[in-house]
Image (cartoon, grey):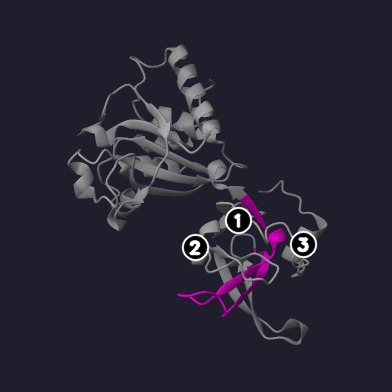
């Protein structure tokens, strides 16, 4: 983020390869679920699911969120031989990696709190269903501020469902997309507005050529704030008269998300001519006033 102005400690750590004091930094004892983002670019660097207590006094992670987001360099400063960890997107110094971490990887990424920004899970995650997840995933991945978009299944009763199971229409699951985003760059409210723009929320259990409960329109909310926002957007759109019929989009609590098979992930990137019920060009256009 171009407007970001680091504090003195953040600058010292990220630009002067410094180290913050142990045991008195912001995140070393943080156990909340969420993402750790680059303070300059907002890219995902680490996840809370990979964080563990190492008693070293700094946040410790068993692996990066995406190996391509960091680079490791030899560091012989201060009379020691270590491996430095830097962010690819901002070229920031993050910390060091050691080989005394937990199994199975055995690595410990010792990271300065000053180099990252933590965002709680319910403030950086959205889960939507809008018909076939190929087009839904591709649409949201094009929105600036969206960090990841994963196709999967949610809202049903069967554990670890396969595509074949969901296609029977008996599992209760919807084809859905779990979106991770940087709230400093795009708001949850705007993502909900995009959802209502990119599909037809007035058709029950159908989008395009796809028919069945697995293709229903739904917002799966993580907390009461998301429910308030989603309900407010839906109500405002209904009052506006912009749809030809009643909105049937469900707003329901989020449960378990099961990622779809790998061949479904980024399907339209792998198969540019594949079926898509979504006008992907809309993702780059400004939202209409509401």
Q: Are there few (<14), some (14-19), or many (20+) residues within 10 Å of tag 1?
A: few
Q: Which residue is mark 2?
A: 66
Figure check: 239 above or below 212: above
The residue positioned 39% from the left and 31% from the top of the image is 198
Element assignment for label 2: loop
Residues under labels 3 and 1: Cα distance? 15 Å
Q: Nearer the viewer, mark 1 or mark 2?
A: 1
Residues under labels 2 and 3: Cα distance? 27 Å
Q: Is residue 139 left or right of residue 273?
A: right
Q: Which residue is mark 1?
A: 31
Q: Quadrant of residue 99?
A: bottom right
Residue 104 image offset from top left, x and y in percent: 45, 75
Element assignment for label 1: loop
The residue positioned 72% from the left and 57% from the top of the image is 26
The residue positioned 27% from the left and 35% from the top of the image is 215
Lower position in the chain sequence, tag 2 or tag 3: 3
The residue positioned 43% from the left and 41% from the top of the image is 140
Magenta run includes residue 221? no
Q: Which residue is mark 3?
A: 24
Of 191 and 33, nearer the camera is: 33
Q: Is residue 144 left or right of residue 91?
A: left
Q: Is residue 221 left or right of residue 12?
A: left
Q: Which residues are magenta?
A: 91-118
Residues under labels 1 and 2: Cα distance? 20 Å
Q: Is residue 40 left or right of residue 253?
A: right
Of 184 and 221, nearer the camera is: 221
Lower position in the chain sequence, tag 1 or tag 2: 1
Magenta run includes residue 96? yes
Q: Quadrant of residue 270?
A: bottom left
Q: Are marks 1 and 2 in contact (CB under 8 Å)?
A: no
Residue 34 image offset from top left, x and y in percent: 56, 51
């Amino acid at each position: 983020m171009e407007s970001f102005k680091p504090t003195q400690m953040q600058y010292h750590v990220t630009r002067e390869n410094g180290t913050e004091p142990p045991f008195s930094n912001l995140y070393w004892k943080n156990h909340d679920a969420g993402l750790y983002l680059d303070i300059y670019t907002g890219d995902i660097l680490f996840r809370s699911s990979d964080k563990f207590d190492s008693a070293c006094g700094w946040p410790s992670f068993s692996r990066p969120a995406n190996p391509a987001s960091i680079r490791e360099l030899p560091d012989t400063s201060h009379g020691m031989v270590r491996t430095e960890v830097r962010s690819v997107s901002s070229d920031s110094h993050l910390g060091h990696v050691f080989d005394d971490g937990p199994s199975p990887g055995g690595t410990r990424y010792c990271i300065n709190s000053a180099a990252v920004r933590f965002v709680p899970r319910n403030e950086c995650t959205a889960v939507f269903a809008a018909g076939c997840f190929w087009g839904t995933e591709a649409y949201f991945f094009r929105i600036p501020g969206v960090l990841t978009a994963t196709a999967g299944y949610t809202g049903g009763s069967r554990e670890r469902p396969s595509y074949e199971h969901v296609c029977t229409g008996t599992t209760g699951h919807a084809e859905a997309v779990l979106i991770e985003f940087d709230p400093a760059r795009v708001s949850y409210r705007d993502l909900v507005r995009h959802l209502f723009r990119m599909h037809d929320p007035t058709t029950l259990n159908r989008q395009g050529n796809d028919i069945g409960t697995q293709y229903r329109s739904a917002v799966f909310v993580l907390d009461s704030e998301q429910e308030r926002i989603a309900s407010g957007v839906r109500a405002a759109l209904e009052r506006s008269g912009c749809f030809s019929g009643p909105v049937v989009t469900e707003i329901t609590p989020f449960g378990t998300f099961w990622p779809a098979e790998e061949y479904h992930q980024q399907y339209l990137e792998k198969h540019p001519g594949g079926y898509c019920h979504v006008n992907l060009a809309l993702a780059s256009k400004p939202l209409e006033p509401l």
